[in-house]
């Protein structure tokens, strides 16, 4: 119940994963999401299969190997924990090594999808195990692999957007174009929440190749605007209505959110400040010492800015 994907922009690898967890084991408390807040209007009391939480679905095992998972969290935890142990002994993974490893988890892969990238020391290749779709290489996104309940929606977004290849370096270019896609999906979740009915969303993580190592893209801000069509069919934009910042402390993903209210004098007032802590599928012991008292909710400065209008 997710959306995960591997693709490339301008020949630069991108690994993408959402955050939403869903289950038929209803919780007594309603889930609160960074985009829309409480989900009770979409999933009223008595709904069957519902979103129940948020979890990181993208994992960097070492500087040469990264993956994303979709499906059963419990089964994915077992697979990734074992792979992480093997990575401590084996820094480089060939395609045949991965095939041999995942062969031992054939039963689990009926309920878990795994997509990722490996750098074997000579080059980078994508891989996929479990249920997933692999599309032929194209000029916009290279070889695209997708899995999860949101795969068709992601394909639709990507098909309607052709990456803008500017003069920026390949990493910046790939990340900027990916943020455009994820920002659009976050914006649609804010406006209609339709994706939640397909059990994916809540936010997104991105992995790419940073200084020849797989790393999560950190410290970016998403601003969401709302457009209005006038009687003369022209469009007018209001001021931004929400700001969502993504950043990491140790292995914890933190999402800070503020809603922005337009004042009579034309200024914006920040209201309903909140923060979300989202753990990786396998926790690092160092997280036990994570201190949140020094995190300033008022600071939304970010190294990367993404806007959706």
Image: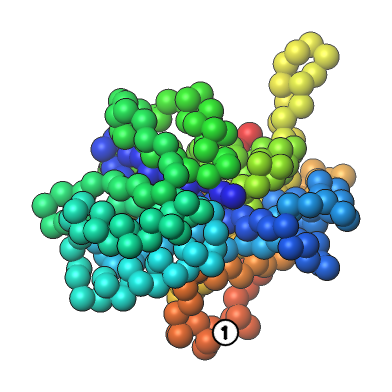
Q: Position of residue 63 (x, y in %)?
A: 27, 65
Looking at the image, how many numbered discs can be counted on the residues? 1
Task: Give the residue displayed 42% in from the left and 25% down from the top.
Answer: 162
Report if residue 218 is visible in the image: no
Q: Residues within 10 Å of mark 1 (few under 14, many from 20)?
A: few
State whether residue 67 is above or below residue 162.
below
Q: In this orientation, which residue lies closer to the viewer: 224 or 288?
A: 288
Q: Position of residue 126 (x, y in %)?
A: 29, 46
Specify the farthest residue to the bottom.
289
Secondary structure under tag 1 reads loop
Q: Position of residue 232 (x, y in %)?
A: 79, 11
Task: Give the residue displayed 62% in from the left and 44% down from the top.
Answer: 186
**Residue 6 position by quadrant:** top left
Report if residue 70 is visible in the image: yes
Specify the farthest residue to the left.
122
Quick check: 250 left or right of 94?
right
Q: How is the image coloured?
A: rainbow
Q: In this orientation, which residue lies closer to the viewer: 209 or 49?
A: 49
Q: Which residue is mark 1?
A: 291
Task: Give the residue displayed 74% in from the left and 53% down from the top.
Answer: 50
Question: Quick one: quadrant of the C terminus?
Answer: top right
Specify the farthest residue to the top.
232
Q: Position of residue 263 (x, y in %)?
A: 84, 48
**Residue 21 position by quadrant:** bottom right
State whether residue 64 is above or below residue 189.
below
Task: Give the residue displayed 51% in from the left and 54% down from the top.
Answer: 111
């Amino acid at each position: 119940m997710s959306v995960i994907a591997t693709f490339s922009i301008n020949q630069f690898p991108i690994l993408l994963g959402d955050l939403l967890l869903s289950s038929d084991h209803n919780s007594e408390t309603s889930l609160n999401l960074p985009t829309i807040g409480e989900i009770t209007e979409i999933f009223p009391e008595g709904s069957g299969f519902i979103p129940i939480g948020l979890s990181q679905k993208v994992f960097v095992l070492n500087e040469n190997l990264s993956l994303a998972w979709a499906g059963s969290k419990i089964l994915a935890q077992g697979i990734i924990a074992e792979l992480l142990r093997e990575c401590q002994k084996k820094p480089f993974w060939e395609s045949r090594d991965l095939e041999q490893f995942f062969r031992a988890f054939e039963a689990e892969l009926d309920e878990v999808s795994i997509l990722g990238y490996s750098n074997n020391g000579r080059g980078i290749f994508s891989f996929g195990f479990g249920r997933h779709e692999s599309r032929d290489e194209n000029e916009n996104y290279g070889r695209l692999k997708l899995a999860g309940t949101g795969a068709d929606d992601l394909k639709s977004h990507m098909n309607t957007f052709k990456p803008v290849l500017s003069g920026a370096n390949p990493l910046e270019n790939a990340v900027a174009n990916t943020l455009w896609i994820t920002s659009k999906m976050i914006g649609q979740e804010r406006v209609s929440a339709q994706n939640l009915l397909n059990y994916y969303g809540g936010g997104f993580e991105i992995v790419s190749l940073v200084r020849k190592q797989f790393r999560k893209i950190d410290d970016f801000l998403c601003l969401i605007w709302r457009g209005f069509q006038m009687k003369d069919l022209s469009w007018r934009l209001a001021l931004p209505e929400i700001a969502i910042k993504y950043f990491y402390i140790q292995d914890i993903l933190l999402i800070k959110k503020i809603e922005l209210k337009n004042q009579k004098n034309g200024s914006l007032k920040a209201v309903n400040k909140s923060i979300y802590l989202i753990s990786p599928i396998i926790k690092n012991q160092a997280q036990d010492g994570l201190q949140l008292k020094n995190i300033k909710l008022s600071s939304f400065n970010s190294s990367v800015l993404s806007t959706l209008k």
